[in-house]
């Protein structure tokens, strides 16, 4: 069957005059309608676990902007919670988790098959979305990559340099690798369940991949992504996988071939010209406008957007930001970016 959705066509390798476009964190605090629905849910986690309201916030940016893809509203830290870690969000600061740095804490984690008990509302959100999305909009499911998820489970919070996770991987490599393995297996089950519920693409967010270098990058960023991608492709042939080894730098080169992902998402620390030559040569890429333009707008936004579209115009490309849109962004600037990409 010939693919009609723009995003799926790009993932299949088609070069399009106007690339499909969506935006990381497109459902988020920069939108007044998101803030209203979040208030209705009570707090962020209650919103994640409320299928009707989570579907509603997923649909809001689709209604407002007509993006080519919707990304399931959830969070990468729901997997540790489903494995038994305590999780809460401190307003204005970010996530907090009970830590997993001792053998006894690892042993207390739940087995992988138990995750669905916690995560089943997320699958219900996917079912609602696959019913309610416009027929031209692709539904993207996602999970955090094992390394990124582990950095939060080990530190109990976000850290500037992922120091506690690096310390554990050096001081207790066996425990660190056992934790990565548990997250890897849970992620395969979680993404599979999203696909069974209707997700058409899955994306693996490795937000902290850039802090792994050399052999550590290969073992703890590339290899888990390869294992997850291979398992997804065996169970669900034809479902495209997007990898996002954020700030991988030279690690972007060859990433698609080494892992089997159909598309590599790029952060904005690499130039689109460099990435077109070294990464897009292997297939579809996604990215990579600096999210700060959504705050500042103006001619710089237009120029940079045009430059990215042009640099990637000879190969398959999905337009996106280099990282998530921030709460201080102006919704008008999002419209300006979309109009620029679509040539209006
Ligand atoms: C590291 C990470 C997390 N979550 C995620 C990552 C990987 C991508 C990245 O690097 O941004 C991924 C994520 N988080 C969220 C989504 C939903 C889909 C989307 O719109 O992209 C996705 C794909 C919602 C969210 N996840 C979070 C929010 C804001 C929560 C709120 O409404 O108060 C949203 C919309 C909270 C969150 N969740 C996380 C942090 C560190 C924070 C706090 C920081 C912040 O406040 O922005 C963990």
Image (tube, rainbow, N blue to C red):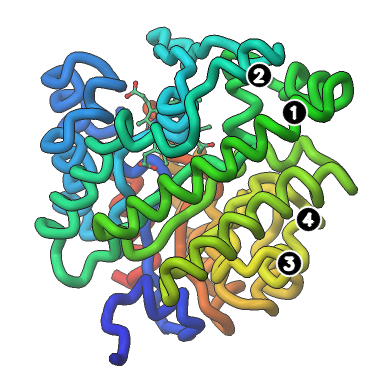
Q: Is mark 4 within 8 Å of ligand 1?
A: no
322 left or right of 198 in image: right
The x, y position of residue 230, in whole percent, is 59, 65
> Residue at image x 69%, y 59%?
271
Residues at marks 3 and 1, CA–CA distance in whole angstroms: 23 Å
Which of the labelled discs sits on residue 251, or is there none?
Answer: 4
Which of the labelled discs sits on residue 21, or is there none?
Answer: none
Relative height, residue 169 to residue 204 (above, below) = above
Label 4: few (<14), some or many (≥20) within 10 Å?
Answer: many
User: Are the residues flagged by discs 3 and 4 in contact, CB closer than 8 Å?
Assistant: no
The residue that label 3 is drawn on is 258
The residue that label 2 is drawn on is 154
Tag nearer the camera, 4 or 1: 1
User: Are the residues flagged by discs 1 and 2 in contact, CB closer than 8 Å?
Assistant: yes
In front of the other: 272 or 157: 157
> Residue at image x 21%, y 59%?
66
- Ligand 1's image quarter is top left
Q: Which of marks 1 and 4 precedes in the sequence? A: 1
Tag nearer the camera, 3 or 4: 3
């Amino acid at each position: 069957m010939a693919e009609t959705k723009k995003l799926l066509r790009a993932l299949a390798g088609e070069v399009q005059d106007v690339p499909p476009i969506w935006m990381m964190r497109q459902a988020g605090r920069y939108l007044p309608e998101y803030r209203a629905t979040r208030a209705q849910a009570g707090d962020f986690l209650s919103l994640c676990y409320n299928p009707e309201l989570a579907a509603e916030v997923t649909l809001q940016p689709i209604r407002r902007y007509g993006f080519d893809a919707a990304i399931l509203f959830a969070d990468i830290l729901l997997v540790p919670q489903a494995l038994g870690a305590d999780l809460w969000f401190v307003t204005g600061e970010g996530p907090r988790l009970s830590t997993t740095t001792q053998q006894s804490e690892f042993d207390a984690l739940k087995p992988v098959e138990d995750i669905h008990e916690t995560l089943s509302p997320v699958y219900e959100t996917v079912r609602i979305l696959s019913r309610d999305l416009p027929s031209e909009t692709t539904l993207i499911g996602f999970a955090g990559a094992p390394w990124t998820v582990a950095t939060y489970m080990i530190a109990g919070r976000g850290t500037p340099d992922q120091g506690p996770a690096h310390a554990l991987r050096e001081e207790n490599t066996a425990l660190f690798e056992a934790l990565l393995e548990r997250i890897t297996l849970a992620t395969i089950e979680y993404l599979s369940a999203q696909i069974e519920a209707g997700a058409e693409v899955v994306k693996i967010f490795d937000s902290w991949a850039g802090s792994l270098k050399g052999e550590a990058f290969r073992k703890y960023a590339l290899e888990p992504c390869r294992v997850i991608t291979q398992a997804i492709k065996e169970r669900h042939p034809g479902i495209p996988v997007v990898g996002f080894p954020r700030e991988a730098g030279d690690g972007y080169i060859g990433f698609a071939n080494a892992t089997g992902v159909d598309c590599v998402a790029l952060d904005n620390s690499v130039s689109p010209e460099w990435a077109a030559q070294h990464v897009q040569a292997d297939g579809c890429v996604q990215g990579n406008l600096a999210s700060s333009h959504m705050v500042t707008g103006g001619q710089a936004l237009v120029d940079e957007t045009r430059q990215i579209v042009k640099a990637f115009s000879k190969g398959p490309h999905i337009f996106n930001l280099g990282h998530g849109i921030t709460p201080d962004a102006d919704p008008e600037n999002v419209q300006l970016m979309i109009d620029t990409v679509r040539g209006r």
